Amino acid sequence: MAGILRNDPDEPHVLVPKRKGTGTGMTINVGNTRGRATVIIFAALVLVLPVGLGILAGL
């Protein structure tokens, strides 16, 4: 997915180097359980935190 996620179940690391031609830096390996958990937790924070703060602001 645009060089952000990588699916390599044989790689044990969560953060892996980006492949050649996709830029520099690291990407998240969703091929292992910890990588998937990292993406799910991050997505939950990005989606739930603003909604929760909006609800709290309205009280």
Image: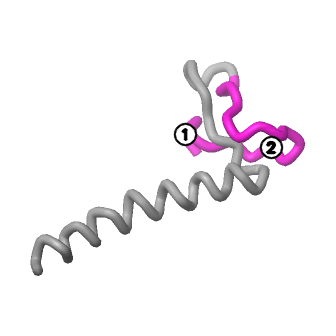
At a point 11% along the width and 80% down the height, the residue shown is: 59
Labels 1, 2: front one: 2
44 up-or-down from 36: above or below: below
Give neighbour class at mark 1: few <14, some 14-19, many 20+ (Cα, 10 Å). Answer: few
Q: Examine the residues drawn in magenta and state their main secondary structure.
A: loop
Disc assigned to residue 2: 1
Check disc 2 and report its element: helix, strand or loop: loop
Q: Which of 33 and 5 is in front in this view?
A: 33
Check disc 1 and report its element: helix, strand or loop: loop
Disc assigned to residue 8: 2
Q: Nearer the viewer, residue 26 or 59?
A: 59
Q: Which of 25 and 52 is in front in this view?
A: 52
In this picture, residue 4 sits left or right of residue 51:
right
At a point 23% along the width and 67% down the height, the residue shown is: 53
18 up-or-down from 41: above or below: above
The quarter of the displayed image where residue 2 is located? top right
Residue 21 picture location, percent across and down: 63, 21
For the residue marked with disc 2, what is the amino acid? Asp
Residue 42 picture location, percent across and down: 49, 54
The residue segment tinted magenta is 1-19
Residue 11 picture location, percent across and down: 84, 38
The quarter of the displayed image where residue 25 is located? top right
Disc assigned to residue 37: none
The answer for how far apart the CA atoms under marks 1 and 2 are is: 15 Å
Q: Mark 1 or mark 2: which comes first in sequence?
A: 1
Residue 45 picture location, percent across and down: 42, 60
Magenta stretch encompasses residue 25: no
At a point 83% along the width and 40% down the height, the residue shown is: 12
Magenta stretch encompasses residue 18: yes
For the residue marked with disc 1, what is the amino acid? Ala
At a point 46% along the width and 64% down the height, the residue shown is: 44
